[in-house]
Amino acid sequence: MIRALGIFLLCAFAFGEARMVMYTATSTVSQKDADEQAMAGLATQIRAHVSAAHSTQKSEVKNSKSSKLNGQYSESIHVQTELSLDGIELEHQQLAKEKWQTTASFNTDKAASLLRKKMREANAKAHTLDSLIHAALARHQYDIAIDAFGEMAPLQLLHQRAVADLAIFEPLTKADVFSMDLFALQAQISEALAHLKISPVDSVPSHVQNNTLGPFTFRVQGEGGTLNSMTVVAEQGKKIIAETKTDSNGLAHFILRNINTFQGSHEVIFRIRLPHFGKRKSQTEYKVTYTSDEPSCSYSLDCMGDGAACIAIENFLSRVGFEESKKGKKLLVKIKTLDTQVFDGGPKKIYTVQLSVSIRGEGIHFDQQLKGSGSSEHSAKSNAIYKISSQKIPQALKPLCK
């Protein structure tokens, strides 16, 4: 069975005028099928033949998954998704009741102009950020320099994608390169950050009281003295349990609640938030060892809800000092989804959920409604559960403790 007929045309106009590439496909399957065939043929010809004039070509493709044009289509996904916004246009025509035609056209001069505009804009923004970074480093405003450098890499990636698209149908020149040397800039920032130091002010608390540890005060200093607006995080294991910024005196203040309160000795690391490049300097973090005499709090869980939500409940209870054990008192948890919504957040969808959480046990009655969002329904539920009050839950679950 013959499914589609494709015709490729390369029109090279007089010097100074636009060059057009056109491919027409006819399908007896659907308009969408004709679109895909036209895009596939056009994309393949752009990759292979756009640099020289060609005579009209015709090809017939059988309706099978192994067809040549289907293979070309699967290989041209990059061109279809990246270039379609910058010069590829589709024109539809229904020839008969069950016969559709699509002509895909590509204006190479228009596409090149749009891609080079993207590249110029990326370079211009990069130069602005570069000036901002150097000015911030000179004033010892490392937080500004760090944030600005974080905006630079996406610009380079955007530029590289535009260059890759442009290279499909145009020869590149020296003017098409990204004008910023990120490695050199990274080395400059790393050298400046090498002078940062975090140190405690006054005595450091080392014992848990009422499920809290603190207060702590840390001073952040650089080559020019104390630094304000620097982010300091507190970590336990691989989790960030608290985060704050230094004040106008370069001081960061903490009172920790979401910590491990099981009996015994534990550690918390306070560190300055820095970019991931380079080795972390020992003077940019401070380790605190503390002990807890809190009574042992264990439970035996019976959870009514989906697996992800039940695991999130276990993780949350562990963070606030409750350990699951077969010998623990019975704890019944019911997790009910009240509402789920999905929003288009650009490249990815955003899920929001509303949950009701009910916790019952001997002498235990706890209820709370929660909202959360995430890139999937599971992550949205987990994020919602982590919003359970870490102050109210220890009090509500006291009957579990011995």
Image (spheres, helix red, strand yellow):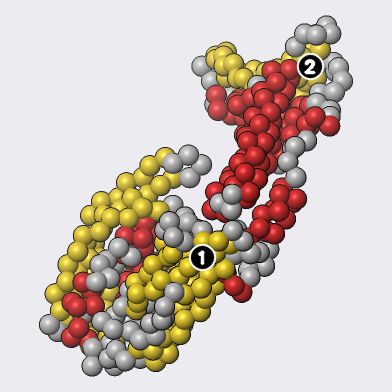
Task: Residue at 67% x, 25% y: name it.
Answer: 117
How far across and down, in percent of the image, does residue 94 sit?
55, 15
Kind of residue at badge 2:
Leu
For image coordinates 32% across by 46% down, the residue present is: 341
Q: In which quarter of the image is the C terminus?
A: bottom left
* Residue that mark 1 sits on: 220
Badge number at residue 10: 2
The label shown at residue 267 is none
**Cα gap from disc 1 to disc 2, whole angstroms:** 64 Å
Q: Nearer the viewer, residue 2 or 158?
A: 158
Relative side of 111 to 354, left or right: right
Q: Which residue shows up at 29% across the image and 80% down it?
A: 211
For disc 2, the neighbor class at 10 Å (few under 14, some 14 to 19, many from 20) is many
Whether residue 316 sits left or right of residue 26 in the image: it is left
Disc 1 versus disc 2: nearer the observer: 1
Mark 2 lies on a secondary structure that is strand
- Taking 270 as reference, is 119 above or below it? above
Q: Where is residue 262 in the image (x, y as percent from the top left)?
A: 35, 87
Element carrying mark 1: strand
